[in-house]
Image: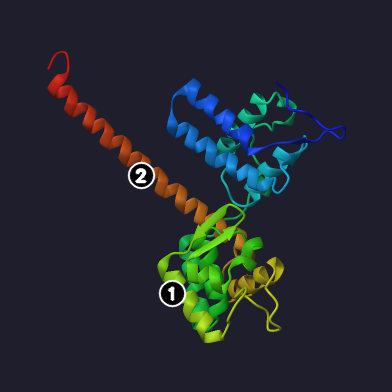
Amino acid sequence: MRQAMREDGVVQLSWSQAEEFLAEVEKRRGHRETVGVYRRNLRHFFQFIEPDGLIDRGTVARWRDALLQDGYKPSTVNLRLSAVNGLLGHLQLRDFQSPKHFKPDPDEVQPSISRAEYLHLLETARSLDNESTYLAIKLFALTGLNVSYLANVTVQAVEDGVITHGNERMVLPPMLQDELRHFIAEQGIEEGPIFLTVDGVPLNRSSMTNHIQVLGKRAGIAKEKCTPRCLRKLYLQTQEHILHDISTLAREEYEKLLLSEQEKTGWNA
């Protein structure tokens, strides 16, 4: 049954529809792992369309572009689009889907900062006694925090060890949590956001980017690499490499198990 559409060409999605779709996927494919991946990707999309769940024919494409701008690889974006396009197809909203298989313009590919350059930024911040920028750089690179959520890094969030934005949760590594606690105590911040201007106003995207780029200039690192977005991209790339290594190790161990079983119970054993 096709989802009802308003006169202005907008439809409203609900999470209950997503759950019905996921149940159908599990019934059809029988793989809980696939359903788990679909559920995570759909939750990410529903966070994008909060708070009312309204979408138009360009919403999914805008989400796709936002993912790319946040540093996700095209292959990862395609996986996320698979789940959303599947849900829209289930609801007979195929004209709301977005193409998956695309290649970004080489001139628009986001630059990357290497882990060595990231560490050099931290060393430069320490040498200049710039603790605030040091911590912000570390925060983006170790948690994948979107710079637009910077105001969510509050005294309470640091104490809890978790930064939240809607349904999204970013856990602070213990060593970073300790450094943030020390900074809060040192600065005498009692509540609210901890990254502030000299006037006590929360730092915005442009101000934070400027702080990092000024530091990058002192460190001799290209300006276009010294942005919160590039540091977030470093986090995402690091996570993907780790997951790939884990997946490769799991596959190798599984093949060893099968070989061992074959040697014992194979037809010609």
Which quadrant of the figure has residue 74?
Answer: top right
Q: Secondary structure at mark 1?
A: helix
Residue 182 position in % (x across, y down): 47, 80
Residue 23 position in % (x across, y down): 53, 28
What coloring was used for the rendering?
Answer: rainbow
Task: Please say whether residue 137 is visible from this viewpoint.
Answer: yes
Residue 51 position in % (x across, y down): 71, 49
Q: State the residue position of label 1.
A: 178
Q: Residues within 10 Å of mark 1 (few under 14, many from 20)?
A: some
Q: Secondary structure at mark 2?
A: helix
Q: Which mark is residue 246?
A: 2
Q: Residues within 10 Å of mark 2 (few under 14, many from 20)?
A: few
* Viewer-closest of 244 and 222: 244
Q: Which residue is most to the right? A: 7
Q: Quadrant of the N terminus?
A: top right
* Viewer-closest of 86 and 234: 86
Residue type at tag 2: Ile
Q: Quadrant of the C terminus?
A: top left
Task: Please say whether residue 101 is visible from this viewpoint.
Answer: no
Q: Residue at x 51, y 52 (%)?
A: 236
Q: Residue at x 41, y 68 (%)?
A: 174
Which quadrant of the figure has residue 199?
Answer: bottom right
